[in-house]
Amino acid sequence: MNKIIPLLLIFVLCSCTTEQVRTSDISSPTSVTTAPSRHHSRLNIGSSDTAPTSDEEENLLPRIVRYLKQGVASWYGPDFHGKKTASGEIYDMYAMTAAHKTLPISSYARVTNLENQRSVIVRINDRGPYHGNRVMDLSYAAAQKLDLEQAGTGAVEIKAIAPEQALAQLQNAAEKQDKSVYLQVGTFGNKNKAMKLQNKIAAHQLPQPEILPSTHQGATLYKVQMGPIKSPESVHKLNIQLAKLGITATQFVTETDQKQISMIQ
């Protein structure tokens, strides 16, 4: 268990080709399924400036559960884009994430459209859906990859997977497409907050993060990223260092036009 704890700190965003979907990669939604109001209890992820003890660290990490279920999934988009999720993160409709009622926050699941057998891997960062018998609310990007965005709902199979499985798939796909993997350490709706995190990391002699803005319908999110990542060992070391700064909500992303920044060897 101790050997995989560092990997559990890594939040992975990936699809069937295991790459994060950027605004430029997919079309704008033509219609949005109306979603019920969300009332979340915010989790204090990454709010401490001190390193967690081993017991505290264990509590931060969701245990992988045996979970396999079929049901109806829906998706949510612009109405919630830029707002906080149950994890305290900012919801990004173009990221490969999902809301689920019981799967642990920060755990990962493979979602398969039972009609066309398309699959994506999503990270659970929100709670819901709270509508009828639906089993999952997908981000817009995940729904489009599954070809569910037009219908609004569809029959899916959800299977929980271990973080290291998702990471390996992301790295393999990125290598085949001559792309790089980056570590995203924060997403903010306020540029000053993104710069504050950037400066905090740089002040502790860690690789300089890059701030990448992403705008949709006038709303801009500022993504703080480090990389490219070249080895699992480097991620292990970096996540330990970031955790000491209270930064635990990190995730892997691949970028099609990511600027080369300080390489993490």
Image: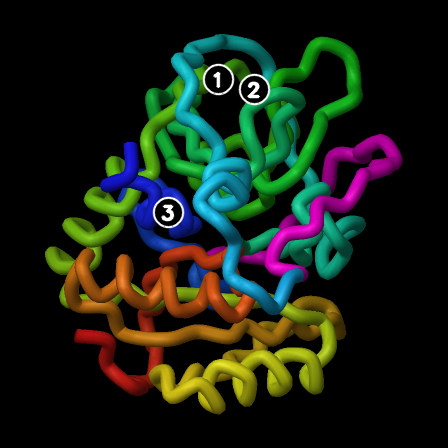
Which of the two residues, 93 or 56, is positioned nearer the viewer here? 56
Query: Which residue is drawn at the image coordinates 33% and 53% (left, top)?
Result: 19
Q: Is residue 205 above or below residue 24?
A: below
Disc number lying in front (2 or 1): 1
Locate residue 210 relative to residue 60 in the image: left or right.
Answer: left
Locate residue 81 relative to residue 3 in the image: left or right.
Answer: right
Contact between marks 2 and 3 (CB within 8 A): the answer is no
**Is 30 within the magenta?**
yes
Kindly report the secondary structure that dominates the magenta region of the rendered protein.
loop
**Is 237 within the magenta?**
no
Badge 3 element: loop
Point out the tag, 2 or 3, that comes first from the N-terminus.
3
Amino acid at pointer 3: Cys
Question: Looking at the figure, which quarter contains the N terminus?
Answer: top left
Query: Which residue is drawn at the image coordinates 37% and 61% (left, top)?
Result: 240
Task: Kindly identify which residue carries mark 2.
Answer: 154
**Residue 121 position in % (x across, y down):** 39, 36
Locate residue 201 relative to residue 74 in the image: left or right.
Answer: left
| Dot label at residue 14 | 3
| 10 Å crowding of disc 2: few (<14), some (14-19), many (20+) | some
From mark 1 to mark 3, how far is it between C-alphas? 17 Å
From mark 2 to mark 3, how far is it between C-alphas? 20 Å
Res. 93 visible in picture: yes
Which of the two residues, 218 or 46, is positioned nearer the viewer here? 46
Q: Which stretch did the figure color magenta?
A: 26-47
**Residue 166 position in % (x across, y down):** 30, 40
Contact between marks 1 and 3 (CB within 8 A): the answer is no
Task: Kindly identify which residue carries mark 1.
Answer: 156
Which of the two residues, 222 or 157, is positioned nearer the viewer here? 222
Query: Which residue is drawn at the image coordinates 18% and 60% (left, top)?
Result: 233
From mark 2 to mark 1, how far is it between C-alphas? 6 Å
Question: Looking at the figure, which quarter contains the C terminus?
Answer: bottom left
